[in-house]
Structures are given as structure tokens and as C-alpha cells.
Image (tube, rainbow, N blue to C red):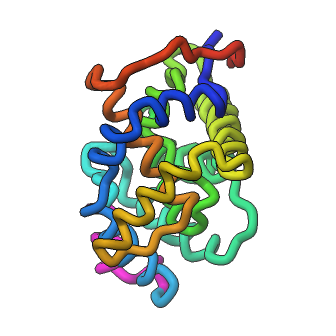
Amino acid sequence: MQTLLSAPELCRVINRNGGAILDNAPSETVDAYLSIQEKLQNTDVSTDLGFQTQFLEHHKVRGVRIKNATLARYFEIMQEEKGSLSMNLRRLSIELFGKNVAGNVRTNHISFVSQMMNMLNDAYPVFDVNSAYIFGFEGPTQSRMTLNERIQIYDEFYNYMRSVYQEILESKMLYDLLKVYEMQLKLKGYKVTIAKRLDLVVRATGALDKKGLLILPEYRSNYSMA
């Protein structure tokens, strides 16, 4: 069983370490993110090799062991999903990696899918090693699990993570901190939605936690995943 952070617990961690988190929240990568997002709306990403290269470099995809056929399908799906009101991590992951992944599907494969979803609609946060770490989530490692079973575990966590983000935004639990971050970004000429700011802040929090640089209260909840 995995015990995961709740929305109030995550906010206590972030608010207690707000200064350090904002000092480490990315700003230089925001420029690349906004540039890619703008191009996304004005090109056919399934055929635009310049866009594909910029996207892959921004998300540091090298070393993820993704086949060329999967990458081609990835950008086809991105083009097809433009304007979609609802995306499904499990469906997209199975379509991409059901037959075209070298070895078992891992966190970086699922992260790659979430990066597409986030670029298309930032109501879908990026799942990566940092967000997983701060929540207390560990990917499946059982060798006997099927690919579908592995993806299901990631999908369950991703849906939980999304629900936490939605609760934080709807309840304005991090309003002040996200407002300060907005002002910091505006000083550099960047206009970023509150959903994306939350995504960046949570991942920055996880990165600091991995390095042992956070002051952590007793924050684990009773929410568990099998």
C-alpha cells in the first residue's frame, strides 16, 4: 500500500518552504514552454520536424528508449487531440506503448504522455519523478505484472494527483504563493496560467525534497493505493 499526500498536506509543505520553492521554480524553461505552446496552435505537429525537435529537447526525452515509430505516432496523436475536451492517460499510454516499448513501461514513459497532455491542456499536469516523489508515489516494479496492469497503477495515481490539483485551485489553498510566482514571471515577460504555475511549483517542490532541502512536517495522509 502506498500512502499519498492530500491537498492540505501538500499545501502545508509548499507554504512552509515557499521561499526556497519559488527560488527554484523554473523561469528560464517557461520561455521554451510558451514558445512550443504557441507553435502547437499554428502548425501540423505530426509533420513539423522543427516543432518535434524543440518539443523533445525541451522535455529531455533522450534516454527514454522510445522507438522511432512510437515517436511518430506520439506527434500524430498530439495533432489529433488538439482541442480535445477530455484526454485519458491510460488510453494514450496503451496506444503508444502497448507494442512499441523496449522493456517494461516506466515512469519516464508515462511522464512523456503527460507532457503531451499538459501541452495541449494545462488542466492535465505533468507527471514526473519529482511530482511522484513529493506525493510519495512509487511506480510498479513487480516483474509479473502485465503492461496493462502497470499502466493502470500509473493512471490511478495520475487521476488522484489531478484531483489534488483541482482541490488546491478551487479552494485557493496556494493563492498567495501562486500570485507571487505570477508576479515573478510577469517581470520576465511571461504570462502563465495558474494551473501551469501550480504544476511547476509542485515539481520544484519534489526536486527539492529529493535533495533533502525541504522542511517537512508530519504530512502523510491516510489515502492509500494498492
Q: In which quarter of the image is residue 31?
A: bottom left
Q: Between 148 and 159, which is closer to the camera in this rendering?
A: 159
Q: What span is in magenta? A: 44-57
Q: Between 100 and 32, which is closer to the camera in this rendering?
A: 32
Q: Which residue is drawn at 66% across and 49% down?
A: 172
Q: Which residue is drawn at 31% across and 70% down?
A: 32
Q: Quadrant of residue 148?
A: top right
Residue 150, given in percent of the width and then of the height, sits at: 60, 28
Residue 3, given in percent of the width and then of the height, sits at: 62, 15
Question: Vertically, is 141 above or below 81?
Answer: above
Q: Between 94 and 152, which is closer to the camera in this rendering?
A: 152
**Which quadrant holds the C terminus?**
top right
Q: Residue at x 44, y 63 (%)?
A: 182
Q: Which residue is drawn at 48% across and 90% down?
A: 42
What secondary structure prevails in the magenta region? helix
Horizontal side, residue 67 vs residue 96: left or right? left
